[in-house]
Image (cartoon, rainbow, N blue to C red):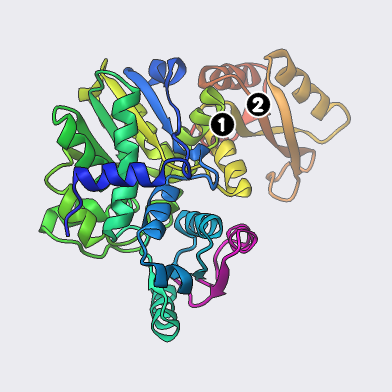
Amino acid sequence: MPVSLADIRAASRRISGGVARSPCVESIALSGIAGARIFCKLDNLQRTGSFKERGARNALLLLPAAQKKLGVVAASAGNHALGLSYHGKLLGIPVVVVMPENAPLIKITTCQKLGARVILHGDDFAEAAAEAGRIAAAEGLTIVHGFNDPAIIAGQGTMGLEILAQVRDIDAIVCPVGGGGLIAGIAVAVKALRPSVKVIGVESVATGQFTAALRIGKPCGVPRHPTLADGLATLKIGAEPFALARTRVDRVVRVPEEWISIAIIRMLELEKTVVEGAAAVPLAAMISGRLPELAGKRVVLCVCGGNIDPSILGRVIEKGLVHDGRLSRFTAQISDRPGGLAELCEVIASCGASIKDIAHDRAFSGPDVSAVQAVCTVETRDRAHIAALHRTLRRKGFHIGPGGAAASTRA
């Protein structure tokens, strides 16, 4: 049965008190780099770190009493599993989560701490989902799908109601698209109440299942590619959300992976907010120039989650610094006699750059046994600072290897 505004309003009342009404705040810093008035709907501040709590709690509360006693099962290695585990514990409803065997350890242990029974099965989501279906049939449990479920979609749509109440006179809402539950729920609510507000979906170039479905008029599978926005990599949009979103979403754009990493670091640096890749794609779309029609407009970004692995965050930060020209690597040929390295370091310091690491390469430094290649990683202010440093080094007689120079100016 199609999800309606009445369903979303009922879901809002139902989950009230159990799911936080997350803030939707204006960001002066992000507005400056995006060329629009930017507001951030911060659902990364939910207890389990994502918007998935909305749909999870709504779906659990709608279960018949007998099914609440038996419990539910879901296949998920991400935020849906966390939201379902947490609210299942609060409501006293048993939860079984089936995860692929390669699921992140942190998510396995967190779901267990939240009281869920976690089963590891298969190499990917499809195999985990098949096992969830087998368990549901064997134990009489209800399957709660992460996005292809009207109760889930209605719950996610409560974010749209909150946005309209929190920000006056908005022009557009920019929302990530994975399985489609969030954008479908938001679009139903927003287009029913404020049809002039644009609802824009954003995918990574490595995902694109909504774009593919729009192209042929129905959900279809897309190839799996590595992506920072792992929450968007469902490979196929749900039939239920696609039916709701296809006529209500005004536009869908796709952003390159490097812009997702830049958006993550901009959120961290400018907003002091940790976001996962999926939550960064709306900002990525704005700052990469994919949405020029929103220049000067009042735009809400759906910051849908903050569950990013710390090791990945560290790598993203370093890549972002390289892209900004704040981390540079180059190779300089120096004398292998006393004082050669000191002279190089003195020049680098005189230019105001900070040495982060230096490694010597004698074996591949060429035929001159008195010379050595110094591979230098330095902290700089920006790309102009890198160029000035290289000019000074060359003027002082150092040979800068072309590979190193290229590496220092490319993301």
Q: Nearer the viewer, residue 355 or 100?
A: 100
Was residue 118 drawn as part of the magenta stretch in this picture? Answer: yes
Q: Nearer the viewer, residue 351 or 25?
A: 25
Image position of 368 with respect to 81: above or below:
above
Image position of 6 with respect to 174: above or below:
below
Question: Helix, strand, or loop for circle 1?
Answer: helix
Amino acid type indicated by mark 1 = Leu
Was residue 180 drawn as part of the magenta stretch in this picture? Answer: no
Image position of 98 with respect to 169: above or below:
below
Residue 208 x/y as whole percent: 27, 52
Label 2 or label 1, whichever comes before in sequence order: 1
Marks 2 and 1 close (CB-CB < 8 Å): yes
**In percent of the image, x 18 and y 41: which residue is there?**
249
Amino acid type indicated by mark 2 = Glu
Disc 2 to disc 1, C-alpha distance: 9 Å
Residue 266 x/y as whole percent: 49, 28
Residue at numbered disc 1: 321
Residue 398 x/y as whole percent: 67, 25
Q: Nearer the viewer, residue 265 or 304?
A: 304
Residue at numbered disc 2: 379
Quarter of the figure that contains the N terminus: bottom left
**Quick check: 344 left or right of 120?**
right
**In percent of the image, x 46 and y 34: which residue is there?**
262
Question: Helix, strand, or loop for circle 2?
Answer: strand
Magenta-colored span? 100-124
